[in-house]
């Protein structure tokens, strides 16, 4: 327990510079990050589909037709199932369930992790010990089997139920990260100053501590949404949640149970799987954006190799001030070694 | 030693918590699905077997919750997890004993390998920030966003087939009898290759990313600059100075995320019909076989706890600071 375990806590720069910039400029800077921007655009697209999907779907996703197991065509963009159902419509309609469960579970888990993590970090003492023990227990117990068992004991688990079960079991990681960060903020001078001026504990937590945790809370939320989407699709895929509500996992469930593989019906499971992967990638990109926003060091963009006047190339690195050698100036030993390696 | 003792106490506590959760979940089931199952197999079950199911699932409404709890513990300690309905009349413990080695071999080895490969790649990516290695990140992110089971399905379609080297399902050739001879082991390895590759591809990127970020953080520490200034070879600074220190948080992160990873990898077994615990869970869910489900959850949790303990020992060996206090 002695070492920091998360990249986020580990890379968060010491000091309040994150909060120092005005809010508006900060938001723009976040969107300017190409990774975050890509992620946000894709996420917005999926949200749009989640809202309008059922209306723009060309067919009723459950309606049968005589086109059994057809390959993709102009009429059925993603092909049809063993009952002649249109897979394109199923994917469109299923988006709503996926997004709903992902976002709701993310909200529930984030709220719990703030409640438990921040109070553990801020209160300290026995409250901290018991709350950390609780979150560690939830962290170590494998979440997915637990979710599967709980969900399968609930008869006819709908979207709402699944979202709650996932949210209630997956808050531990966020709580742990938040606790670590709160611990480091708790003894900062500005918090002490607020305490000295007689601000209430409640006000210190919400107005002094929480704004400095925004980035961590946001990345925890995005991480939980990824996990929730994966878990929900898994539950549907093994046939636990109700198969009457369409989501991408349900499509995969039918594809698997109807031996789509053996029939060579690749179009049955490829679109849903790709949609999951693209959504997951978009969310991860947003998270990278947040990480890089908090800790600019992690950015990978930009040229790190610089050509000097006399044609040598020097690789820039954190912690170094490379001497760009010209013929007149002597070169430091460090840089010369660099050049040898590069050449 | 104190560190290890603390962890041990924590794991015992977690094991207790898991068993208690396991005790309460079936008591929340509305209706009595287990009773109906018992009725279905009436006459084929011995009184002992029915009794043990009564204790496990709290069907005896007259007993107080506390006495149910005590009985439950006694029964779990005897290793009696009830009878499985899917594989009637085999006891759950017997089924798990057969399938656990398969899961440990597949999931254990691949998780460890993925950690090692991912960490090494992460060292390189973090050290040479801005080089080609950074181009690897988006690709691996995409791969890790693919659900394990879907990648498995894809792998089966593309690589497995009647005349392919890779079998599409099972843990070994159907005609063989499990034993320690070359033919059987060869067949088992051949069957586990495709599931193992699937797990590797989708789990490796997490390790690359965390290790890269730790390396970037460590690379700006003063002692790295000093190591450079001393004129040590690049390779030595990277491995013995930067990577050595960046590894520590990654190892404890490994321990904590084992629960997540193991949950995901179990699904690969389902797709490949691999004779492990994950496949058991799938069969149990399909047949509403509650005793088997509970047993699987218990065994998975306990295995993850043991794996965690091993990771802690590794941490102890890697970090001299935990060793200092006698």
Image: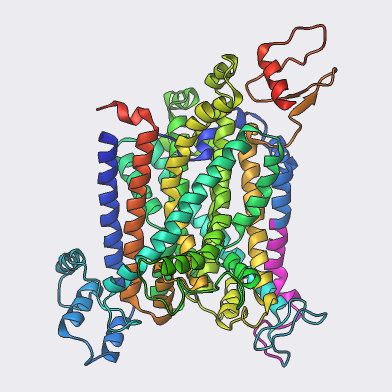
Residue A113 appears anywhere in the view: no
Judged left or right of residue A267, residue B74 is: left
Which residue appears at 59% of the width and 18% of the height?
B228
A36 drawn magenta: no
Q: Which residues are magenta?
A: A43-65
Residue B161 appears anywhere in the view: yes
Q: Does residue B74 sit above or below A318 in this rendering?
A: below
Given residues B323 and B109, the one toward you in this image is B109
From the top left corner, tell me how far across and down residue A103 is, in percent.
57, 59
Given residues B56 and B77, the one toward you in this image is B77
Which residue appears at 50% of the width and 70% of the height?
A235
Which of the 4 image quadrants contains residue B122? top right
Which residue appears at 50% of the width and 76% of the height?
A239
What secondary structure predominates along the stretch shown in magenta?
helix
From the top left corner, tell me how far across and down residue A155 is, in percent.
42, 78
- Count of all numbered marks drawn on residues in the image: 0
From the top left corner, tell me how far across and down residue A327 is, in percent.
82, 9
Quadrant of the snapshot with the C terminus of chain A = top right
Q: Does residue A84 sit above or below A236 in this rendering?
A: below
């Amino acid at each position: 327990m002695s070492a920091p375990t998360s990249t986020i806590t580990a890379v968060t720069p010491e000091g309040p510079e994150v909060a120092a910039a005005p809010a508006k400029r900060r938001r723009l800077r976040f969107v300017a990050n190409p990774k975050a921007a890509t992620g946000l655009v894709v996420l917005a697209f999926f949200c749009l589909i989640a809202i309008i999907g059922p209306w723009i779907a060309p067919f009723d996703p459950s309606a049968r037709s005589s086109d059994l197991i057809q390959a993709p065509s102009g009429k059925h963009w993603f092909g049809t199932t063993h009952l002649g159902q249109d897979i394109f419509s199923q994917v469109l309609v299923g988006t709503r369930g996926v997004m709903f469960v992902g976002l709701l579970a993310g909200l529930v888990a984030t709220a719990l992790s703030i409640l438990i993590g921040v109070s553990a970090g801020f209160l300290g003492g026995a409250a901290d010990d018991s709350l950390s023990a609780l979150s560690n227990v939830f962290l170590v117990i494998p979440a997915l089997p637990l979710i599967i068992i709980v969900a399968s004991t609930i008869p006819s688990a709908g979207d709402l139920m699944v979202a709650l079960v996932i949210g209630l079991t997956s808050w531990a990681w966020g709580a742990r990260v938040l606790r670590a960060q709160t611990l480091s903020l708790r003894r900062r001078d500005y918090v002490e100053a607020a305490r000295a001026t007689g601000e209430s504990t409640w006000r210190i937590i919400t107005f002094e501590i929480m704004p400095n945790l925004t980035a961590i809370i946001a990345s925890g939320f995005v991480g939980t949404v990824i996990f929730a989407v994966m878990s929900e699709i898994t539950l549907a895929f093994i046939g636990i949640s109700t198969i009457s509500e369409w989501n991408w996992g349900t499509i995969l469930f039918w594809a698997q149970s109807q031996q789509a593989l053996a029939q060579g019906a690749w179009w049955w499971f490829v679109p849903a799987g790709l949609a999951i992967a693209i959504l997951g990638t978009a969310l991860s990109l947003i998270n990278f954006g947040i990480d890089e926003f908090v800790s600019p060091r992690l950015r990978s963009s930009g040229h790190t190799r610089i050509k000097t006047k006399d044609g040598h190339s020097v690789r820039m690195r954190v912690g170094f001030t490379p001497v760009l050698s010209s013929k007149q100036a002597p070169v430091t030993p460090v840089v010369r070694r660099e050049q040898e390696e590069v050449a | 030693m104190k560190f290890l003792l603390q962890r041990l106490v924590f794991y015992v506590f977690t094991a207790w918590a898991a068993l208690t959760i396991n005790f309460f979940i079936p008591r929340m089931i509305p209706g009595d699905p287990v009773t109906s199952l018992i009725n279905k197999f009436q006459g084929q079950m011995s009184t002992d077997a029915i009794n043990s199911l009564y204790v496990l699932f709290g069907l005896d409404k007259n007993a107080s919750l506390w006495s149910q709890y005590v009985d439950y513990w006694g029964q779990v300690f005897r290793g009696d997890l009830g009878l499985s309905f899917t594989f009637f009349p085999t006891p759950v413990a017997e089924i798990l004993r057969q399938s656990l080695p398969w899961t440990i071999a597949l999931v254990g080895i691949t998780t460890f390998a993925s950690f090692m490969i991912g960490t090494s790649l992460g060292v390189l990516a973090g050290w040479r920030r801005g080089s080609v290695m950074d181009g690897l990140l988006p690709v691996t992110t995409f791969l890790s966003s693919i659900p394990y089971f879907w990648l498995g399905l894809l792998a089966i379609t593309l690589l497995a087939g009647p005349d392919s080297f890779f079998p599409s399902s099972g843990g070994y050739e159907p005609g063989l009898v499990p034993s320690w001879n070359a033919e059987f082991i060869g067949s088992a390895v051949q069957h586990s290759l495709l599931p193992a590759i699937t797990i590797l591809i989708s789990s490796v990127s997490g390790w690359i990313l965390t290790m890269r970020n730790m390396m970037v953080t460590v690379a700006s520490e003063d002692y790295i600059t000093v190591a450079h200034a001393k004129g040590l070879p690049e390779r030595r600074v990277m491995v013995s100075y930067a990577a050595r220190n960046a590894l520590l948080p990654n190892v404890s992160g490994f321990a904590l995320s084992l629960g997540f990873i193991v949950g995901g990898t179990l699904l690969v077994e389902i797709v490949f019909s691999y004779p492990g615990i994950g496949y058991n869970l799938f069969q149990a869910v399909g047949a509403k076989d509650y005793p088997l489900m509970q047993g699987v959850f218990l065994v998975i949790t306990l295995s993850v706890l043991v794996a965690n303990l091993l990771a802690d020992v590794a941490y102890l060996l890697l970090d001299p600071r935990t060793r200092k206090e006698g």
